[in-house]
Image (cartoon, grey):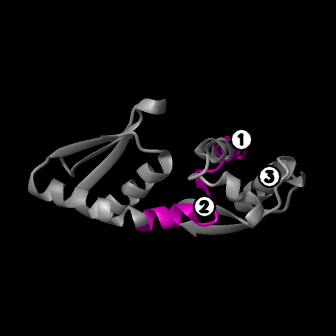
């Protein structure tokens, strides 16, 4: 728990990874954590057979709780970097699975609709669609609402 003290010699990413490792250890899990920085987001991928039960497709509540804790720790140590947690590459696989949905939504936005709202998505799917749809500058996405009523809004950029 050296990462809690001012004289810790690791950077913000090392501190967060050490914090996550300690949390997993306290929960009784053994895993490796791989770190990847994409734009202004640090993705901690928790990898191992022992952590399969943490995957968002099994039970999203646990990984959401870990994400919440790591994000609160980020505020405590003062960083503008975004932290995301993944388990065994689930998020990346999910992005690939949603590419077809994204293409279909994009086509609807180009043809008929000026705005689409999608309810009932978990945060992993919502984030994946944000990433896929925002690759096109003519489309803008935004999450609105709270809790079970959180939803994705897609609209033509500038409207």
Q: Residues within 10 Å of mark 2 (few under 14, many from 20)?
A: some
**Going 66% across and 41% down the picture, which residue do you hit?**
65
| Element on which disc 2 rests | strand
State whether residue 70 is above or below residue 108.
above
Marks 2/3: CA–CA distance: 18 Å
Question: In the image shown, does 82 or 94 lie closer to the viewer?
Answer: 94
Identify the image quadrant of the C terminus.
top left
On screen, residue 111 versus residue 21, left or right, reads left
Which range of residues does the magenta coloring cover? 68-96
Point out which mark residue 24 bears.
3
Tell me which label, 2 or 3, sits earlier in the chain: 3
Q: Residues within 10 Å of mark 1 (few under 14, many from 20)?
A: few
The residue singled out by tag 2 in the image is 42
| Element on which disc 1 rests | helix
**Going 85% across and 51% down the picture, which residue do you hit?**
28
| Observer able to see residue 93 | yes
State whether residue 106 is above or below residue 74.
below
Indicate the position of residue 4 as horizontal and vertical percent values.
Answer: 85, 47
| Element on which disc 3 rests | helix
Indicate the position of residue 57 as horizontal and vertical percent values.
Answer: 56, 53
The residue singled out by tag 1 in the image is 76
Q: Is residue 20 magenta?
A: no
Q: Is residue 92 magenta?
A: yes
């Amino acid at each position: 728990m050296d990462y809690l003290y001012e004289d810790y010699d690791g950077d913000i990413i090392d501190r967060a990874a050490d914090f996550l490792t300690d949390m997993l250890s306290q929960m009784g899990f053994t895993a490796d954590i791989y770190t990847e920085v994409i734009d202004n987001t640090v993705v901690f991928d928790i990898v191992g057979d022992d952590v399969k039960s943490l995957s968002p497709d099994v039970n999203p509540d646990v990984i959401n709780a870990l994400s919440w804790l790591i994000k609160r720790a980020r505020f405590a140590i003062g960083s503008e970097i975004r932290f995301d947690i993944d388990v065994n590459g689930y998020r990346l696989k999910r992005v690939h699975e949603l590419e077809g949905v994204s293409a279909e939504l994009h086509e609807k936005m180009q043809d008929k609709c000026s705005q689409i709202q999608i309810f009932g998505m978990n945060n992993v799917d919502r984030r994946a669609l944000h990433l896929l749809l925002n690759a096109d500058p003519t489309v803008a996405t935004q999450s609105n609402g709270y809790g079970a009523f959180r939803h994705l809004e897609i609209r033509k950029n500038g409207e």
